[in-house]
Amino acid sequence: MNPYEELLLRHCQNSGELMVLTAENRGHLRTVPPFLGDRFIDVGIAEQTMIGMAAGMAMRGRTVVTHALAAFITMRSYEFIRDDVGIPNASVIMVGMVPGVLSDGNGPTHQAIEDVAIMRGIPNIGVFCPCDIDEFVEGMDYLITDGRPYYVRYIGMPASFVHTEPFIPGVAEVLHTSDAAESDVTILTYGYMCRIAHAVIPLLEAKDIRVRLVNMRTLKPVDERRIIEELQQSQVVVTLEDHLSTGGLFSIVAEVLLRNHPEHHARVLPIALSSWFKPGRLQEVLAHEGLDPIAIAARIETYITTHVQEHGAHE
């Protein structure tokens, strides 16, 4: 039984209110269904039906965790999420499987690279993008108890670094910082790209570029205070995401920047997808799309050389 299954089983044992639904996506739930009994329902390939059922259960006092491919739970079920979950603020958590580049071998129809933009646009729906199984389980433990509707990008990979800050919605986690008071570059990222960004750090530091790495964790609510601080303290802020640049973290940073009217000149480098990616093995996808550590480090170094060193640091 994996850590997520253990979490679901524990919540079901401790509370009579939790229901677990899936739309024929059991890859991460292979062991637990027999233990859940009638608390587990597989609706088959019927994502809209699943969300409608979940909303109805939530209206009767249940907390419902639903699972489907990220592309389908967000797009095929959009109207149901908006009307049946968002408007009544129903206690439904929507877990999207293989989001972003993790849908590596699949074509455009199965790629969820606009899911954050879609879900954060619905009032009352939160967006949680964990970077490993440890953060996912910790966050889900919180969200199930909290009872608010959330979209969650699922990730089942083991942690590649130690989390030192507890999960709190709307509070980002600083994963790495330089010794200097001001960094040359801060990388803001989330989800799977956190581990890619972590591998970028030594490449940049070998070039004497001071780096901070921030795991945004939840993109709604988002840690506006952290974004503003990083814009003030770093020469360049990089938004790194396996999502379209439209509507994702880059858009969020731009919105925060305009809304708070900082008095400094901010340099923001977006690194994201511009369209659907070419299917392949994960490392091939990253290399082809320029999202591997070497390509990212080179792009950041070039940007700093061109926009900071040649034109001077901002105030």
Image: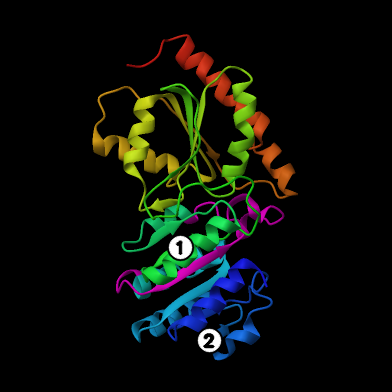
Residue 298 visible in image? no
The residue that appears at 45% across and 63% down in the rendered structure is 151
Task: Tell me which amino acid carries mark 1.
Answer: Tyr
Residue 295 lies in what quarter of the image?
Answer: top right
**Chain part drawn in magenta:** 86-115
| Residue 118 percent coordinates (x, y) | 43, 57
- First along the sequence among labels 1 and 2: 2
Give above or below for 242 relative to 229.
below
The residue that appears at 42% across and 45% down in the rendered structure is 172
- The residue tagged 2 is 39
Q: Does the magenta-highlighted stretch encompass residue 106?
A: yes
Label annotation for residue 151: 1
Task: Tell me which amino acid carries mark 2.
Answer: Arg
Q: In the shown orientation, is residue 256 left or right of residue 215?
A: left
Front position in the image: 244 or 133: 133
Q: Within 10 Å of the Cα at label 1, are there few (<14), some (14-19), or many (20+) other Cα atoms? A: many
The N terminus lies in which quarter of the figure?
bottom right
Q: Does the magenta-highlighted stretch encompass residue 244?
A: no
Front position in the image: 78 or 59: 59
Is label 1 in a helix, a strand or a loop?
strand
Give above or below for 25 relative to 137.
below
| Residue 5 percent coordinates (x, y) | 61, 73
The residue that appears at 47% across and 70% down in the rendered structure is 77
